[in-house]
């Protein structure tokens, strides 16, 4: 029998419908793969086999009766940031020790409504703060990819590192993820998977642990563009419980996948050609443009003049919002409590013990930029710069650009425990240089595997779209996926 | 702008995070690295630019001011480290 875990989500769906195998068999295959792989990869922080098999049996009953939703019987991994009723939800933080919510996030509710099966909760950077999945309380996720001729462990990227690693290593058919500055697209690029951050407001944030509320969006990581589109359709939709969630019809994104790029204008922003950009990234980018041209797209040079200010503005806005959102972790309502001589002492000791170093650093920065006397100089200034960043994109789209092509990351995956990156917080932040502009402007962005570096590690390209035009991203992403034609599966060593 | 050791301690106090004496120097240098990085925003001319309040052009939805949820205090406190009669328990605040 073929290894069921190697099927794409779309193929698994076909197989289930045709009764070639059952949801219970498919789920069992994934649970076995997780059991074998997780000690090496550390992608899951909690596996829920009983719940998974219960859900699979329920799906089998529906499938047998010729019923079922668009994801009926499909086993998924869920990032630990999503609230899942009665199940481990800790944002990979010590401070949420033992937290099991009494509610279900809207996005995961949508997936279960459509028949998906939950395999467990996926590792991530603590509170989604990181680009390497090394800030997790549960330890780093190890990428299924290794450089050719090397046994050194590489990072899967972050913050959705568990999601990306699990999808790439066949430990789920697809995974939920979230993206505040690049946390879906950067790990997707590092692991040869497809990741899309939809337009801000497309997915409900209700029930998702908040990092920076004006930037956070949920999205899928999957093995193909089509799989990502199928998941995106299910995850999206209006929710009155999130006041920033948009009341807009959700298209069938999968229907747009084979639409092609004929007649589209693809923008190439000159400001993304950074000094010192590695030659192989530059080459990948030109190659991507050639592929799109060959399918009938027109390429146009554009300027997004405020690009270089997006990352510094982000490191004011995101920590500011985080310092406010994370004020709720005080040892009173949930999670860890460290007793002190009075209530303030208890707060301070709980938060000192419960938060990891990167999270504390960001809360401290956020507290500082919001403090009396500094608010205008930092926060208000950053929000003005954000207006300018958004306007850059609006100008490009108004001038006839349909989507923008850029590299997804400045390099391929780096090693676990990289000393140069550990010594300089800003160096790690630079991982998000191509992705963070998209969050600042609230736009959709997709990362698609497009090539490999000299050591055989995957590299991704990013497409940025107009607000609520994810369909064009799926169509153009599919053109790149087809043209790249590459095998972006890791060589199994675990 | 850069922060000194006293400011690091003050921020820690505001953020309700205990910063041990031995950690102050490291925080100070990390915070200054980040503040140094964001300093480049000073070059941007933002005269007449409105600060962003909503990234999508939308008016915040409102609902009727009525109770729409609740009535399950035992669920609200179910994850708390210490509770009594569906109340959160904290150290004595008023002597």
Image: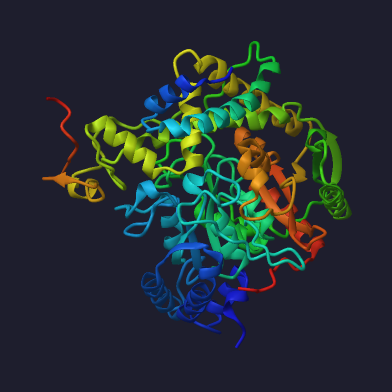
Location of residue A433 in the rendering, given as x and y in whole percent from the top left corner:
69, 38
Q: Residue at horizontal 29%, vertical 46%?
A: A334
Q: Looking at the picture, does residue A446 appear above or below residue A153?
A: above
Q: Nearer the viewer, residue A292 or A410?
A: A410
Where, quadrant-wise, is the C terminus of chain A in this rendering? bottom right
- The answer to whether residue A239 is visible is yes
Residue furthest front as drawn: B22
Location of residue A298 in the rendering, given as x and y in whole percent from the top left corner:
86, 44
Q: Looking at the picture, does residue A160 appear above or below residue B91?
A: below
Location of residue A187 in the rendering, given as x and y in whole percent from the top left corner:
63, 53
The quarter holding residue A130 reads top right
- The answer to whether residue A320 is visible is no
A474 on left or right of A212: right
Q: Residue at horizontal 25%, vertical 42%?
A: B69
Location of residue A256 in the rendering, given as x and y in whole percent from the top left corner:
67, 56
The quarter holding residue A266 reads top right
A15 on left or right of A292: left
């Amino acid at each position: 029998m073929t290894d069921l875990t190697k099927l794409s989500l779309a193929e698994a769906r076909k197989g289930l419908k045709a009764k070639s195998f059952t949801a219970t068999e498919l789920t069992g295959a994934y649970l076995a793969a997780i059991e074998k792989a997780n000690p090496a990869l550390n992608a899951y922080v909690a596996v829920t086999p009983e719940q998974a098999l219960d859900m699979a049996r329920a799906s089998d009953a529906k499938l047998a009766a010729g019923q079922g939703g668009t994801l009926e019987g499909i086993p998924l991994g869920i990032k630990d940031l999503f609230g899942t009723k009665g199940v481990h939800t800790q944002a990979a933080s010590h401070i949420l020790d033992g937290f099991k919510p009494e509610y279900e996030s809207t996005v995961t509710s949508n997936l279960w409504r459509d028949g998906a099966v939950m395999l467990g909760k996926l590792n991530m950077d603590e509170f989604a703060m990181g680009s390497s999945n090394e800030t997790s309380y549960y330890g780093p996720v190890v990428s299924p990819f290794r450089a050719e001729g090397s046994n050194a462990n590489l990072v899967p990227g972050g913050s959705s590192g568990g999601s990306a690693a699990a999808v790439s290593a066949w430990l789920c058919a697809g995974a939920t993820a979230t993206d505040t500055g690049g946390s879906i697209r950067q790990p997707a690029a590092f692991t040869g998977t497809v990741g899309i951050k939809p337009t801000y407001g497309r997915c409900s944030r209700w029930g998702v642990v908040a990092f920076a509320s004006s930037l956070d969006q949920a999205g899928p990581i999957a093995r193909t563009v089509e799989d990502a589109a199928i998941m995106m359709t299910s995850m999206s939709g209006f929710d009155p419980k999130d006041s920033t969630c948009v009341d807009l019809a959700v298209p069938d994104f999968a229907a747009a996948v084979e639409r092609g790029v004929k007649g589209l204008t693809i923008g190439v922003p000159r400001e993304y050609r950074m000094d010192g950009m590695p030659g192989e990234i530059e080459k990948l980018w030109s190659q991507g443009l050639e592929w799109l041209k060959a399918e009938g797209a027109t390429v146009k040079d554009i300027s997004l003049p405020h690009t270089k200010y997006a990352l510094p503005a982000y490191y004011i806005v995101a920590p500011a919002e985080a310092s406010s959102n994370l004020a709720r972790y005080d040892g009173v309502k949930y999670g860890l409590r460290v007793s002190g001589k009075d209530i303030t002492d208890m707060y301070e000791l709980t938060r000192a013990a419960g938060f990891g170093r990167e999270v504390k650093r960001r809360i401290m920065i956020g507290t500082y930029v919001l403090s009396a006397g500094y608010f205008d100089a930092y926060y208000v200034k950053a929000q003005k710069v954000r207006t300018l960043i958004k306007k850059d994109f609006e100008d490009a789209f108004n001038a006839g650009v349909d989507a923008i092509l850029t590299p997804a990351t400045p390099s391929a995956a780096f090693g676990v425990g990289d000393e140069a990156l550990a010594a300089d917080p800003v160096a790690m932040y630079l991982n998000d240089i191509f992705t963070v502009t998209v969050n600042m402007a609230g736009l959709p962005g997709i990362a698609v595997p497009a090539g490999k570096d000299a050591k055989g590690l995957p590299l991704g390209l990013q497409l940025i779209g107009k607000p609520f035009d994810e369909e064009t991203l799926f169509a153009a992403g599919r053109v790149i996926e087809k043209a790249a034609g590459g095998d972006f599966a890791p060589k199994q060593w675990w | 702008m850069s922060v000194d050791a006293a400011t690091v301690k003050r921020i820690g106090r505001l953020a309700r995070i205990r910063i041990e004496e031995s950690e102050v120097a490291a925080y100070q240098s990390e915070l200054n690295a980040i503040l140094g990085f964001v300093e480049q925003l000073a070059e941007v001319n933002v005269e007449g630019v409105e600060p962003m309040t909503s990234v999508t052009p939308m008016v915040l939805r409102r609902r009727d001011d009525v109770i729409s949820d609740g009535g399950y205090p035992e669920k609200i406190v179910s994850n708390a480290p210490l509770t009594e009669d569906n109340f959160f328990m904290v150290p004595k605040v008023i002597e």
